[in-house]
Amino acid sequence: MENLDFARLRYEGENHPYTGHPAERSTMPELYYLLLMTILTSAEANEAQWMHLYRIAKGAGYAQDVRELLPSAHALTGERIVECIESIRRDDLTNAFLLDAMLLYLLREEENAKLLEYIAGLCALLDVAPPVITETIAVAKCIIEQDHTHYLKTISETFTLYEKESNIYLQEKNDAYKNYSNQSFRSETRSIIIKDCDWDDILLQLDKWNGTEITFLHCDCADINMESINVPRVSFQDCDIGDIVLNTCQITTASLQESDIGNVVLNKCASKEILFHDCSAESTTLNNCTVNTFLEPDSDD
């Protein structure tokens, strides 16, 4: 660690912050970074790990040099660890901390059983369920690989991690992200991501898009109509939609996350699963539909 240029690492990290990092809502941010720092002290840290920590701190608005916490991390007592854990849980930062911890581990670029065991111990103290750990590892791997398409697919299948709190780690979006003003296009890729669209009433003919996985991200739509489509997976993430109407559609999985919706109406549709997670809707109506699994949204009433 003596060979690391911390002045340069801090400068570069602060010039490439993870803007909007969830740790910005921490009431005692030094405790968040202090516990993360113990991951660096459990095994010799490299440049990438320190850079990650500096980018987190700047993105969350932490003004101090996180390296100043290093002596405290080395001398951390059990009582102090409990204080850190309680602070993280109180501020609803457990998932964010676990993702940061896994990213720090993966940035080592080599396996370290002792460090992994230490992180597992922190998970136990944070009372993190095994499925959450599995989901977090999957998302962390997508971030390390900067695989945007796989990331969106993975995040749409999780029930504990939110896209808006984890996409901050992704670099500039690649060609998987599209911003179309209408639906008249044909894609040569199987995974299509439609981002930041602002539509009025629109009829989406997804069959013509030639995709097997279609994700709408941060879209604002008055009303959406889909007719006679046969697409394996369609998901809406962090969208604001008036009404959604599906007529005679066959969708293996329809997933809606962190979205506000008016009315949801399905007519003569077949689906293996329709999942609403952290969504609100005025009403949900299914007419002559076959759905194996239906997880209802929260009601606006």
Image (tube, grey):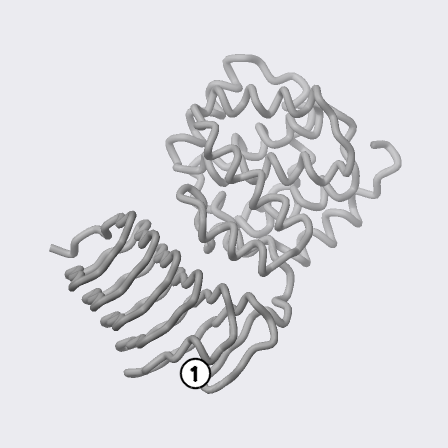
Please say whether residue 217 is visible from this viewpoint.
Answer: no
Q: Element type at marker 1?
A: loop
- At x 16%, y 53%, the residue is 299
Quarter of the figure with residue 140: top right
Front residue of 218 and 269: 269
Please say whether residue 252 is visible from this viewpoint.
Answer: yes
Of the 4 image quadrants, the one containing the N terminus is top right
- At x 44%, y 39%, the residue is 26
As drawn, which residue projects farthest toward the left? 301
- At x 52%, y 75%, the residue is 210
Q: Is residue 46 left or right of residue 166?
A: right
Front residue of 60 and 183: 183
Q: Give how far across and how far down residue 247 sits, in percent.
A: 25, 73
Q: Is residue 187 left or right of residue 297?
A: right
Of the 4 image quadrants, the one containing the C terminus is bottom left
Does residue 169 sit above or below 239 in this rendering?
above
- Disc 1 target residue: 183
Quarter of the figure with residue 175: bottom right
The amino acid type of the residue labelled 1 equals: Gln
Q: Give how far across and how far down residue 262 sits, in percent.
A: 20, 67
Quarter of the figure with residue 128: top left
